Amino acid sequence: MSDLPGIVVMGASGRMGQMLIKEVLANDKARLVGALERPGHDWVGRDVGECMGGQPVGVAVTDDALETMAKAQAVIDFTAPAATVDMAEIAAQARAVHVIGTTGLTDEDLEKVALAGRHATIVRAGNMSLGVNLLTLLTKKVAAALDEDFDIEIIEAHHHHKVDAPSGTALMLGEAAAEGRGVDLAEVSDRGRDGITGARKRGDIGFHAVRGGDIVGEHDVMFAAPGERIVLRHLATDRAIFARGAVKAALWGQDKKPGEYNMLDVLGL
């Protein structure tokens, strides 16, 4: 049992954090060795199983990342950009796999994560599900096959608690479309249309965000030309798909060299 990779979950009290903890506990190839929360959180010092409304699991919630990571082989992180950047440095020091599902990272944040990747294995993806990563590949292929007569629009929908837009998955799909077309997404991205915007610019990739209710995640990539449309779609109905993918990534990374990887690497796609 003690030979199994030890996994730490960040943001233990959050919806994804609790889902990840359940997934690690249910996995016979991993063990939960840590549950992290911010200083002052009322879960700190208590057994995480009891905090989640179940039986004790023998792991107390802590706010001490350094001490916790000393006994871990991986950390799964679906938190906030600042916390993720800090954890990247700690995980690198511990030579632990850092699985990052955090969205909203800036270019500066990504540069810091990349520095940590010189010393540790990092798996970062805007979405950890198999279906979305297949959608990413399809988006790239379709974008490469069609010329700019086909306008590309990416429409995403999430629950009303989501704090960033476009979603990390939408941006991942946008990057795939831009890569398929051989362009830089930053130069063709079109977001937040409002008022008299003028005609759509040929070659742009548009983004639209819907927020409401308890939508887990819906993503459409639309290729629209005069007289026809192609729509690629993925619907997520259970957050467990993201947790399963993240744990799979943490286990996959155990024998990999330092560097940055994504879910396409994990899935062999």
Image (spheres, helix red, strand yellow):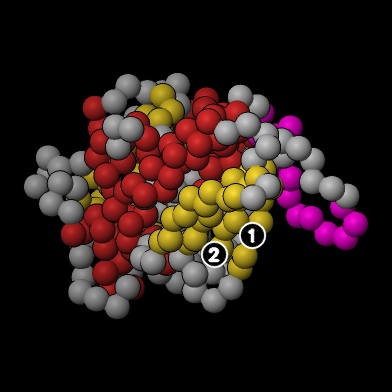
Residue located beneath label 2 in the image: 158
Q: Kindly identify the amino acid type of the residue bearing the numbered disc 1.
A: Ala
Q: Residues within 10 Å of mark 1 (few under 14, many from 20)?
A: some
Q: Is residue 189 left or right of residue 72?
A: right
Residue 13 position within the rendered picture, expressed as x and y whole percent measured from the top left: 42, 66
Q: Nearer the viewer, residue 112 or 178?
A: 178
194 in magenta: yes
Instruction: Classify 85 as above or below 127.
Output: above
| Residue in front for this viewpoint, 26 or 176 | 176
- The magenta region covers 184-197
Q: Residue furthest front?
A: 227
Which one is nearer the viewer's eye here, 207 or 256?
207
- The answer to whether 51 is drawn above or below residue 156 in the figure is below
Please report contact status of discs 2 and 1: CB closer than 8 Å, yes or no: yes
Q: Residue sitting at 72 percent across and 39 percent down?
A: 204
Q: Does 254 sit left or right of 182 as displayed?
A: left
Q: Position of residue 148 (x, y in %)?
A: 67, 34
Hey, which quadrant is residue 260 in on the image?
top left
- Mark seen at residue 2: none
Q: Mark 2 and mark 1: span between their CA atoms?
A: 8 Å
